[in-house]
Image: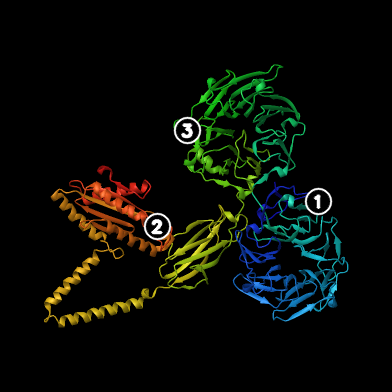
Amino acid sequence: MLRLFCALSAFAYISYASANTEAPDVNTDAPLNIRVWTSDDGLPHNSVNRITQDRLGYLWIATWEGPVRFNGREFEVFDDRRQSGLPDNGMLEVIRAPDASQVLFGGARGGIARTDANDWQTFDTVPPRVHRLFVDANEDLWIGTFNAGLVKQKASGERQTYSTEHGLPGRSVHSLLMTKAGYLWVGTNNGVAQLASDGNSFTPLTQLPDNTVLTMLQLTDGRILVAIDNKLYIANDSQQPRFEVFPTPLRSAINVLHQDMAGNIWAGTHKNGIAKVSLQEQTLEYIDSTHGLPNDHVLDIFCDREGSLWVGTHGGLVQLRSTLFTTYTEADGLPANYIRALHQLRDGTLLVGGLGGLSQYQNHHFSPIATVPELHNKSILSINSDEFDRIYVGTFTDGLYVVENQELLKRLDKADGMVSNEIRAILPLSKYELLIGTVSGLHRIDFSQDQLQLQTFTTDDGLPHDYVASLYRDSLGTIWLGTLTGLAQFELKSNTIKPYDFAAGNDAQYIFNIYEDASHLWLGTDRGLMARDQSTGEWTVISRANGLPFDNYFGITRDNSGNIWGGNSRGVLRLPQRQVDAVLAGTQTQVSYRLFKKADGLQTAQMNTGDQAIIKSQSGEIWFALSSGVASTTPVEVGHNNSVPPNVDIHRVAADNQPIAPGAELDAKVNRVSFSYAALGYLNSESIRYQVQLRGFDKNWVDRGNVMSVDYTDLAPRHYQFAVRAAYPRGEWSQIATVDIYQRPELWQRWWIQLLGLLIIVLTIAGLVRLRLRGLAKSRQRLLTLVNEQTKELEALANQDSLTQLANRRAFDRFIQRALLRSEKLDQPLCLAILDIDNFKDVNDTYFHASGDEILKRLADIIRDCIRDNDHAARWGGEEFALLLDNTNIDTAFKICERIRSRVAEARFEDIDTKLTVTLSAGIAQHHTNESHSSLLLRADKALYSAKHDGRNQVVIADDDR
């Protein structure tokens, strides 16, 4: 379990107070998620020396292997010194430039560069190791170096160096601070100095020890913190500051100080992680490697504009952010992470059962009940208690345990006559009487006497199934039994079981859980949620038909606001109170839901089945039994997360994989345009959803899920504007980011070229006509012959597919009409076949249209080679071909089509791809007497559909021709 002891953002503020002057571990109340990125995730080096954020929202990181930019999903590493101009990649410092759209880096060899990721501006190097950079109000750059003093670079480029002869107590500058009062403080390897009013000398602050000062911080209230070794010194902001010492030293030397958005003070240490420092309470609290930090040596701390705290360590980059759920695991005292049952006692103690036994929750920590060692390491399935505070614990293999006053009172198992040791449900009836649900039947047990009274009920006694999963006595006194195949009622007086018959049409069987609110009895079933109005006895089903995302619900409860909580192995679900009550009242049919998973703070999305897998505590928290721990949430916090949409940046536009500038004109030969974008939000980066629109191409927004790029191919020549927006789950859409491009036309697509071509054609025709008119008298017969020849050529063009040289659809329609008349007149058989290339779209998408055209031409050659002289073949459209087989019965037609299919399957296309194979499917129909050509086409097309549906690469004869 990880819990945040400070506010990481405004919506998650939790106050803290403690009188303990020792330095405790984290143990307060706001959920905290720790996430770590290392070199395995794209960081070039695990030592994160410094962190900052630019105006757009990118995080910039100084590492030993180069400058890095991070968008929450991907690290962009700038390690090519030919691009950056830096003398080396060892970056020790990064700060925001004055305009915030750029950042400044400082390196181990004295290199300094300014960048926005696209353009790099380098400055003259300083002596090796730039420890700190600072830009003052005059835009003068102050550079703290190792053993070479402090360098001031004016906006004009002029430099001045300060060292010990100017009053600095040491030559190595490790920290810089410009106070609100306008005083420049310099932390060195030998103490702190303040810039004198003349601007040319420094005055040492002799009240402080003459040791290394790695970090200084001015608080929002004006006070100044100076860290020397493991001690904090507090001063006022004046020319002659007065210092006092924070009474509690930290566990190790302090490397960095930071104050977050909520005013909390953080200290990063040399060996003990980070600590929250309370100046008022004079206390310290730590987060270290035992809580999830990858390394306890902290190099930097930074709070981004969403309130997340970022920690640079020698083991990677760390994010600490608030979450909606708290998950407790073995690290918090659970004996094992696999949890099945939850129960809260009347005194508020929470009991948790799972693979490792029974635990109790106190002071944010779990521990076994020490006085009942018999329950240690048992597999717990069910827990309940009675009004006398007696605890009943059902196990997987060891029967029932009864605990009273923290001691084992009794154990019951098969040796006592029980039908099974697997106890799935427990319902106390009185001080010494209870119902026990097992996987082999139901028991009614009375152990008030020395002699155990045990009765067994099975399917022979009316149980719908021997597997009893849940037991519940409602406010009306009715006892409900939930089984593997249905619901039943148990009558105490008559000691009988009555199966409960749901209304017709409800096929729910497995009753996982039973729960009652003020007006309804609820069932978690394998067909959704069921609610029984306790005043009328009417049932309402809320299932997939009402908008729920799945069928099974292992548990159910209402929170204090009336919202319904449920869940199963796919996550935790919340239904809003107003919509649920409207469905129960019959005024609406649909409900919305919110599904919570790992990103919301759950260790796993998988809930477990158990007697009570979800409960509401007396304080209003909702608890969940998970396959990896137990989780809780305070419902009032849910819904306030991720309320501010992230900023979106389009960071790359490429034409045929080559980067281009926004607004660029694309060459006419460009085939593919790519856009890469990122929403610069870090609360839950992977769950941010995107919508894009290429204005001029897309009419509406297109959902992209969490994909951060999109490609467009074969764009028509015109102006386009690409737009993208983003949102957190259930959050508002961000401001729209846009970029413009212009697709230039081919030479032949330009209007003046087309006009010129038309003019040439007109002039050419006019000249030809004039020449022909002149020779009309001399060679009329020759002219008529020429006209006839040209007419035939035009007819051929009009009736021929230009790509495959086969007949086109218009010509084929005439063939069909003539063939039908001839078939009817001569009483000869006639067959029609329609052939379609299988998966041709995938071929086009993979090898592009030019290769697709080549394949069409080769298949046309195969078809011509396989048919007879009196047969007709045509390109029907796209990747479809048609065959008209005159004076041919269905068997012969089948052989012809099968020959074509086989030849196509055997064809090779090595010039396109050595592995490429092409297949086609065909449907054949034989003409029936008085059948129209449209009917014949329809039957052949249906046969083709059957060939496609049955696996492709086959020839199918129409049903009524077989």
Q: Label for residue 23?
A: 1
Residue drawn at 72 percent across, 79 percent down: 154
Give how far across and how far down residue 814 sits, in percent: 20, 58
Q: Is residue 487 above or below residue 623?
A: above
Q: Label for residue 632?
A: none
**Kind of residue sitting beneath label 2:** Lys
- Residues 851 and 27: in front is 851
Left or right side of 251 for 330: left
The disc, 2 or 1, on the residue closer to the chain's N-terminal end is 1
Residue drawn at 27 percent across, 78 percent down: 761
Residue drawn at 71 percent across, 70 percent down: 107
Q: Label for residue 507?
A: 3
Circle 2 SS class: helix
Give me the C-alpha separation between circle 2 and circle 1.
Answer: 66 Å
Q: Nearer the viewer, mark 2 or mark 1?
A: 2
Q: Quadrant of residue 872?
A: bottom left
